Image (cartoon, coloured by chain):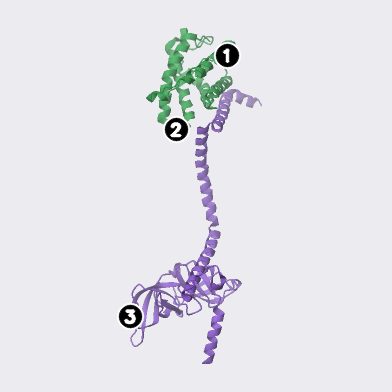
Chain colours: A green, B purple
């Protein structure tokens, strides 16, 4: 397997850096928006190479989650959610498999799969990730309404940023 | 071994996923305050519930021992109440010092009923205390609701009690607060009712008055409740009332009794016998 280690590592540092240096500081302090955050670090797991073996994917999710947790002072919460997301990545990919199928060499090429596919992939992946994340953060389904509200508002903001990020970096592999 | 490897290859991802999630959740509930609190609260609810059930079950098995200890405690309380009552009747102007053993005239011993009859003309009950517990013939027996009877016969471990529901039962009883006294007998019909005879005609009686033991016999201390007046009528050709008494104590339903031991009984009997000899 020909992983592009440098680019993966670079993306890791970049995503964590933007996440904890920029988006962590953004607080929406306006009514319903106060429930929302911006999370872009799941993008790293989303964009890991198509053929990454599952155990490696899970460990990657765990490391990324714990790194973010270290800055958010919430040990284990992001990690638990991201390990879950890494586990279901295959199912998500299978659900939204395009008619032309995945190209094993360039699975995540925007040019090949189109921007619509990208947005739906990111939306589904982030939706599941955020729902699990907020459930674990609240740790009780008594607050189901708050969990859903946080998930949806955060999803909207994060999707916007993810969209920009994907346009700028235009991942190929 | 090959099967194990095959299993790992097939389910390795899932196993690792579960393992990592377990680690994550362990970290979450250990290092996060709010999640840890919720975890503790929830597990406490669960374990508290289970503990409660276990406790309930084990409590059930301990009921007998608890019953016995409560009975002993009751006996002590009853003892102090009765002794207080007796003392304050005899020494109206002195203050009662409960702990002082000089004032203890009556001792109470708890006992359990092992056998009883209540559908005959002469009814007895058997208690699980006997010579071993220094029970003697002639001691009085009460329950928490009032008088029960008098010890008729004693064996090593048991004693037979002649209840007040017996044709030959004679108890010295008085109207509470005015001290006119008479003899309580059973009318041999109704286990809830008894007769009080020999009360002088000038006594003031009214329906509802409480009847208590008089304390003139050495068997019962003054003030053990018996029942209340249901009806009364002067006997023809006699200078006394006959009173129908509603018994407080549902004697067929009693399960626990207290045997009363009068400490000064022998002394009292001795001096009274001396008087009788003179006649």
Reading the image, the residue beneath label 1 is A9
**Which chain contains the residue that carries disc 3?**
B
Nearer to the camera, A163 or B20: A163
Q: Which mark is residue A58?
A: none
Q: Secondary structure at mark 1?
A: helix
Q: Residues within 10 Å of mark 2 (few under 14, many from 20)?
A: few
Label 2 vs label 3: CA separation?
77 Å
Taking the spot 37% from the left edge, 76% from the top edge, the residue there is B244
The furthest residue to the front? B93
Is residue B113 placed above or below A159 in the rendered structure?
below
**Which chain contains the residue that carries disc 2?**
A
For the question of whether residue A98 can be seen, the reply is: no
Quadrant in the picture for the N terminus of chain B = top right
Nearer to the camera, B51 or A78: A78
For the question of whether residue B218 can be seen, the reply is: yes
Left-right relation of B228 to B254: left
Q: Secondary structure at mark 3?
A: strand
Dot 1 and dot 2 within a common chain: yes
Q: Position of residue B110 (x, y in %)?
A: 53, 67
Taking the spot 50% from the left edge, 77% from the top edge, the residue there is B219
Label 1 vs label 3: CA separation?
111 Å
The furthest residue to the bottom? B279
Q: Residues within 10 Å of mark 1 (few under 14, many from 20)?
A: few
Q: Secondary structure at mark 2?
A: helix
* For marks 1 and 2 on the same chain, the one whose residue lies earlier in the sequence: 1
Circle 2/circle 3 CB separation < 8 Å = no
Q: Position of residue A113 (x, y in %)?
A: 46, 10
Reading the image, the residue beneath label 3 is B233
Is residue B200 placed above or below A43 in the rendered structure?
below
């Amino acid at each position: 397997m020909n992983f592009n280690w440098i680019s993966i590592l670079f993306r890791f540092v970049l995503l964590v850096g933007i996440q904890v240096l920029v988006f962590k500081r953004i607080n929406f302090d306006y009514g319903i928006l106060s429930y929302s955050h911006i999370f872009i670090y799941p993008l790293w797991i989303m964009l890991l190479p198509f053929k990454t073996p599952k155990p490696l994917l899970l460990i990657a999710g765990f490391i990324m989650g714990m790194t973010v947790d270290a800055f958010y002072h919430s040990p284990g919460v992001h990690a638990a959610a991201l390990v879950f997301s890494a586990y279901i990545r295959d199912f998500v990919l299978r659900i939204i498999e395009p008619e032309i199928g995945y190209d094993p060499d360039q699975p995540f090429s925007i040019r090949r799969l189109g921007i619509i596919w990208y947005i739906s992939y990111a939306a589904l992946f982030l939706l599941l990730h955020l729902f699990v994340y907020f459930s674990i953060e609240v740790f009780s389904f008594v607050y189901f309404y708050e969990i859903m509200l946080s998930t949806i508002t955060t999803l909207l903001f994060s999707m916007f940023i993810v969209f920009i990020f994907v346009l700028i970096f235009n991942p190929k592999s | 071994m090959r099967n194990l490897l095959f299993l790992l290859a097939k389910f390795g991802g899932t196993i690792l996923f579960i393992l990592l999630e377990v680690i994550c959740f362990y970290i979450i509930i250990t290092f996060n305050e709010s999640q840890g609190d919720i975890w503790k609260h929830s597990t406490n609810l669960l374990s508290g519930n289970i503990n409660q059930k276990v406790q309930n079950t084990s409590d059930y098995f301990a009921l007998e021992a608890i019953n016995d200890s409560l009975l002993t405690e009751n006996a002590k309380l009853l003892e102090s109440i009765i002794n207080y009552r007796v003392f304050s009747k005899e020494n109206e102007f002195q203050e009662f010092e409960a702990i002082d053993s000089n004032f203890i005239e009556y001792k109470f011993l708890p006992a359990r009923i092992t056998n009883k009859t209540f559908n005959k003309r002469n009814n007895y009950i058997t208690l699980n205390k006997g010579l071993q517990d220094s029970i003697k013939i002639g001691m009085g027996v009460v329950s928490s609701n009032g008088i029960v009877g008098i010890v008729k016969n004693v064996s090593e471990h048991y004693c037979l009690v002649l209840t007040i529901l017996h044709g030959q039962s004679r108890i010295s009883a008085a109207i509470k607060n005015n001290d006119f006294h008479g003899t309580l007998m059973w009318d041999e019909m109704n286990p809830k009712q008894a007769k009080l005879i020999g009360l002088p005609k000038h006594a003031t009686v009214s329906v509802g008055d409480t009847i208590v033991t008089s304390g003139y016999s050495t068997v019962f201390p003054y003030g053990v409740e018996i029942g209340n007046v249901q009806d009364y009528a002067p006997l023809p050709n006699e200078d006394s009332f006959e009173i129908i008494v509603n018994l407080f104590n549902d004697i067929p339903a009693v399960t626990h009794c207290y045997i009363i031991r009068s400490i000064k009984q022998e002394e009292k009997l001795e001096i009274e016998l001396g008087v009788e000899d003179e006649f």
